Image (cartoon, rainbow, N blue to C red):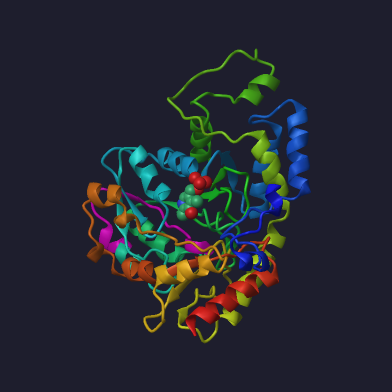
Amino acid sequence: MPEDLTPTADAAALDSPPFLPFALPDIGDEEIAAVVDCLRSGWVTTGPRTRQFEHAFAAYLGGNVDAISVNSATAGLHLALEALGIGPGDEVIVPTLTFTATAEVVRYLGAHPVLVDADPDTLNLSLAAVEAAIGPRTRAIIPVHYAGLACDMDGVLALAAAYRLKVVEDAAHAFPTLYKGRLVGTLASDATVFSFYANKTMTTGEGGMVVTRDAAVARRVRLMRIHGISQDAFERYTSRTPAWFYDVVAAGFKYNLTDLASAMGIEQLRKIDRFLLRREQLAQAYGNGLQGLPLRLPPAPEPGSSHAWHLYVIRLQANARLDRDELIARLSERGIGTSVHFIPLHRHPFWRDSCRLSPEQFPVAEASFACMLSLPLYTRMSDADQQRVIDKLRELLT
Ligand SMILES: *Cc1c(COP(=O)(O)O)cnc(C)c1O
């Protein structure tokens, strides 16, 4: 019997729609054609498309910023901290409710991440916790714009000014996000780092962008992203000095973005306003569809600010019939993928043990982690896909 005719054990599976993944990238014919063009061009590593992508990204943000592409946001955070002189023995304040990359880059430089608790409303870092964590060795703060809603940057920048600290924004979730009328990336921090990882609001497969208005930081990031070599390969290839000549002026890294990735990035960036509009529609529809359930929905942005809706994080209230783990399992059985953002860093063995952390230090992150899950929200979801998520949640929670 041919395999495709074998009756399936679960007849019901035939009737049910396919599994709705938690996230999917939105790659169109434009990205595919651009990558094929790049392949045919003969120049696949960092070159003209990367320069074009950087210029287009900086132009999108406005505000006279310089944009330096890198092969991940993790690399970008590392380079930004390095350019700001963070080194051995320094302390850098990092929220516990983030991905491990935000903290690990501090360790790359021999410095120590000092984890702080979250604000109960926004789940962004708590300003009171930041201020309490500042000590004589504190050199920088890395605010993370959690889920795509900007931190209280006026508050962060005021603390930074008062204590003479550097600020590097982890904007992996926040492209594009408005804070009081200005895009994240153009605020008065020292540098801002965006991610183009596969599930972010736009993607190059892997990739990131360091954005800064500080010319010295930009110069150092550019240098260190490619081995501490004074010119990149394309500059050497096209310049009038002999192509074989270069100066190594520092022990740099290998963090450059390829033209293949940049070709994708250019096309994704052209679509970003449309992507955002769709994300906003989906967030609004969740807000309406989930009314009346024992859920705490994500906060809306304040007037003049916006939400990138990279994540739609809901929190189960204490009176819900299911706990978080049960809800995730029941949704998965019903064909719906979800996730959790994040397992707080203080719960991971490495950070817990090396920083000697205990859960009592982070009551808000602990309480939120226990009841939070992230629902699917991405541009390739249809209204019907989303209605299924809403229906299943209503079925399970009422
Ligand atoms: C995804 C993510 C990163 C890392 O981004 P990469 O481009 O994968 O290195 C850093 N911080 C946060 C908060 C993230 O969600």
Is 68 on the left-hand or right-hand side of 162?
right
Front residue of 356/143: it is 356
User: Residues in magenta?
Assistant: 130-148
Front residue of 2/13: it is 2
Residue found farthest to the front:
1
- In which image quadrant can residue 124 be found? bottom left
Q: Residue at x 42, y 70 (%)?
A: 326
- In which image quadrant can residue 107 be found? top left
Image x and y of residue 314, in percent:
48, 72
Is 16 on the left-hand or right-hand side of 161?
right
Is 92 on the left-hand or right-hand side of 55?
left
- In which image quadrant can residue 276 be found? bottom right
Against 5, residue 281 (above or below) is below
Is any part of residue 398 visible from this angle?
Answer: yes
Is 252 on the left-hand or right-hand side of 61?
left
Front residue of 83/48: it is 48
Q: Residue at x 49, y 42 (%)?
A: 76
Image x and y of residue 94, in percent:
36, 54
Q: Residue at x 57, y 54 (%)?
A: 200
Picture mark count: 0
Image x and y of residue 140, in percent:
36, 50
Q: Is residue 133 in the magenta section? A: yes
Against 83, residue 339 (above or below) is below
Image x and y of residue 138, in percent:
29, 50
Q: Residue at x 49, y 26 (%)?
A: 227
Q: Is residue 140 in the magenta section? A: yes
Is any part of residue 191 visible from this angle?
Answer: no
Against 98, residue 319 (above or below) is below
